Amino acid sequence: MMDSIILGFQEVAHWQVIAALLIGAIAGILVGAIPGMEPAGAMAIALPFTLTMEPLPGIILLLGCYGGAWYGGAIPAILIRVPGTPVNVLTTYDGYPLAQKGQPMRALSLAYSSSFVGGVVSILALIFLAPFMAKIAAKFGPPEFAAVMILASVSVVLAHHQNIRGAILTFGIGMFLGTIGFESPHHTLRYTFYQTWLLGGIPMVPMVIGLFALSQAFILLETKSPPKVPENLASTGRFVGLFEVFKYRATVIRSSLIGLTMGLLPGVGEFGAQFLSYSLARRFSKKPEEFGKGSPEGLVASEVSINACTSTVLVPLLSLGIPADPLMAMLLAVFMVHNIVPGPQLFVEHADFISGLYISLFLLNVFVMVFLLIFTKYVVRLSSISPRVIGAAIMILGFIGTYTQNFRITDGLITLAFAIVGRFMLKNGVPAFPMVVGLVLGPMMEGRIKQTFSISDGDPTIFLTRPLAAAFLTLAVVAVATFSWNHFRNKTVEAS
């Protein structure tokens, strides 16, 4: 144990890791502070560059964009009532009223400290849960992995219950796109239409850049004026709310547990954690009437639950090799480029890497916290930058990142096609996340199912005779049945 910790510090001490940590964290903060941007877009732009880096710096750069954005997203949510990222929407409920009462720095420092507590709790959960799940996964065979992937697919689709049809459609499209290219077991070409650039399938990097980065750029280019931000934000009182989070210990514990649990569920993550945490905090609060009017407890519940998800979403990826969302799918791409296969053997073969990852995540939260306490008044000014300028910059960086990965014009055309599709999906409220998860999970699921039928001589009952596989499939069926029952019951109530 001590040897792996020492090796972890040696991994982190490399200048590339430190640089990636600082650059990723600052980039994430800036992305969160700019209304209209999302961490998915920033990660999509950074992804092509991380593929040429060593594994740990590349992953830390992406995780810096991911984790820093949740911190930075609280800034516009509190100061101008515009969530910096979509998951900071409930932060506006109490953060903005608190700022309007003349306490903006109290609200911001309380949000930062709440995020820090949630982030540290999430890292501790990752340290204990990931090896435990890896030990269980070591006993898995192809049927168990196939069943887990089916359960993950169901979870991703049902997580978008507000537009279940769109989620099913986009997930199905993603799975179909994953079948394109050279199919290795039988050496056949599928849907290539004799085009050599399709032999390797639809590349994920152009897809995610188009869907998440350039589609946001289109929206920013259509936005005429930036929101008004407070002028002369006083730096006094920046430490007022720093320790106030510990006044609400019950809320912190409850929101942390909710965030940890939701982070483990594919496709649920920060959105589900935030809304459930806020609802329960108001229900059990001694002052529920203050919620929505500047309640510090409501702000704590929102920010703690968001950041409690940030590391536990890594648990399925590291222990099972299954990405819980498109952001984790981007991390999986970095793993695979460097021939590091996530799964049970990762903790044995790359113990130094895992220790370095844990230490880096903790340092990331510390740096973001300190940076924001010192430089918030400067970061706020980003909200006043013209959205069109930001959109144009994203366009340029997105196409540069796409082209420099393989230096192919076709990758740029794929990016443009998915950018147009992504803009249409955003405009019509169709979720794009299931498409990326389908692209990644589809080929993995197909491979595991083929292996399963190979060892069972084509007998599908192997899924029922293996206890773990049967349990996972049962959970998937129960989830679908429960959703269907609730859906039809609500329809009946509305009709009556």
Image (cartoon, helix red, strand yellow):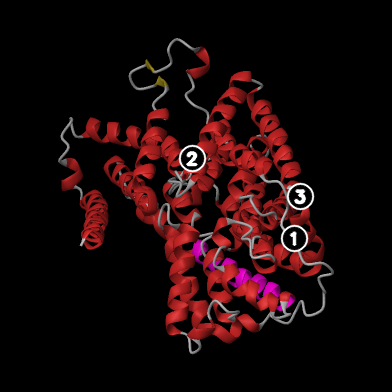
User: In the image, what residue type sits under mark 3?
Assistant: Ala
Write the residue at 42% across / 12% down. 193
Measured in 3D between alpha carbons, the distance from the residue under mark 3 to the one under mark 2, in whole angstroms, is 36 Å
Q: Which numbered disc covers residue 19?
A: 3
Give the residue furthest to the top: 194
Element on which disc 3 rests:
helix
Q: Residues within 10 Å of mark 2 (few under 14, many from 20)?
A: some
Residue drawn at 51 percent across, 88 percent down = 287
Amino acid at circle 2: Met
Asked where in the image residue 146 lies, by quadrant, the reply is top left
| Residue 119 inside the magenta-drawn segment | yes
Residue 139 visible, this orientation: yes
Q: Quadrant of the C terminus?
A: bottom left
**Horizontal placement of 453 versus 177: left or right?**
left
Q: Which residue is mark 1?
A: 228
Q: CA distance from mark 1 to mark 3?
A: 33 Å
Q: Are marks 1 and 3 in contact (CB under 8 Å)?
A: no
User: Which mark, by number, is residue 425?
Assistant: 2
**Among all residues in the image, which is located at the extreme bottom?**
286
Furthest toward the front, the residue is 496
